[in-house]
Image (cartoon, rainbow, N blue to C red):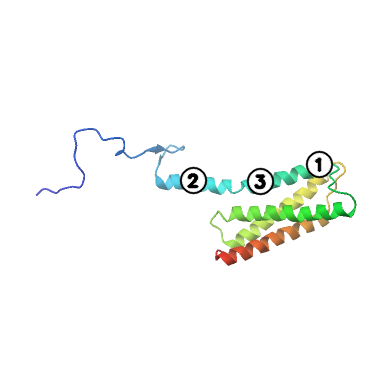
Amino acid sequence: MLVRRRCRVSMRPPSRRSTPLRVEHPRGRRADARTRGADTLRTVRLLAWLPALAIAAAIWMLSATPDLAVASGWLDTVTRKAGHVAVFGALAAACILALRRWPVAAPTCLLAGSALALAYAVLDEWHQTFVPTRHGAPADVAIDAAGIGIAAIVLAMAFRRRGTA
């Protein structure tokens, strides 16, 4: 008994459209849809760290500037401290959102992202001790921690509202 198959048998060579696309993986194995998707996901996860790296670089450059003055008198102090809160809050938010791209629970992302930003705040104040006319202050780390805490609370509320917490 003959079994009829769905594919046609042809004597002519297959057209370009009918041949499957074969892509060689950089590590020597054939890339299928799963591997290509994993590479794309890995790229997206790594690119998610670019905002955090850009903010950290901006903080580092501002910390390395001797005689950094924004205004004069008490306005300079208020502006600097508000800048600390805003910039380190943005750094914490960028770290937390980058961690959300990985398969990690929201509370873990909040804690780890906040810890990364706080560690960078300590490193930043230590870095300022080597810059002429600048000094590192534990009070600045506390102000940075306030900004980090505000960002973490805002993002926790956003995650809870979206149902992703």
Image coordinates of residue 58 in percent, x first then y, are 72, 44
Q: How far from the left and from the top, in percent, is residue 57? A: 70, 44
> The residue under label 3 is which amino acid type?
Leu
Indicate the secondary structure of the residue bearing disc 2.
helix
Left or right of 137? Residue 153 is left
Task: Tell me which amino acid carries mark 1.
Answer: Thr
Image position, residue 47 (x, y; %)? 58, 46
Q: Residue furthest left?
A: 1
At 63% across and 56% down in the image, what residue appears?
A: 96
Q: CA distance from mark 1 to mark 3?
A: 19 Å
As drawn, the label of residue 95 is none
**Alpha-carbon span between mark 3 and mark 2:** 20 Å
Which of the pair 80/92 is nearer the observer? 80
- Label 2 to label 1, Cα distance in Å? 38 Å
Q: Is any part of residue 117 visible from this angle? A: yes
**Circle 2: residue type:** Thr
Who comes first in sequence, dot 2 or dot 1? 2
The residue beneath circle 1 is 65
Residue 147 lies, with reference to residue 55, above or below; the image says below
Q: Quadrant of residue 140?
A: bottom right
What residue is pinned by disc 2? 40
Label 3 or label 2, whichever comes before in sequence order: 2
Q: Tag 3, which secondary structure?
A: helix
Q: In the rendered image, which quarter contains the C terminus?
A: bottom right
Residue under label 3:
53
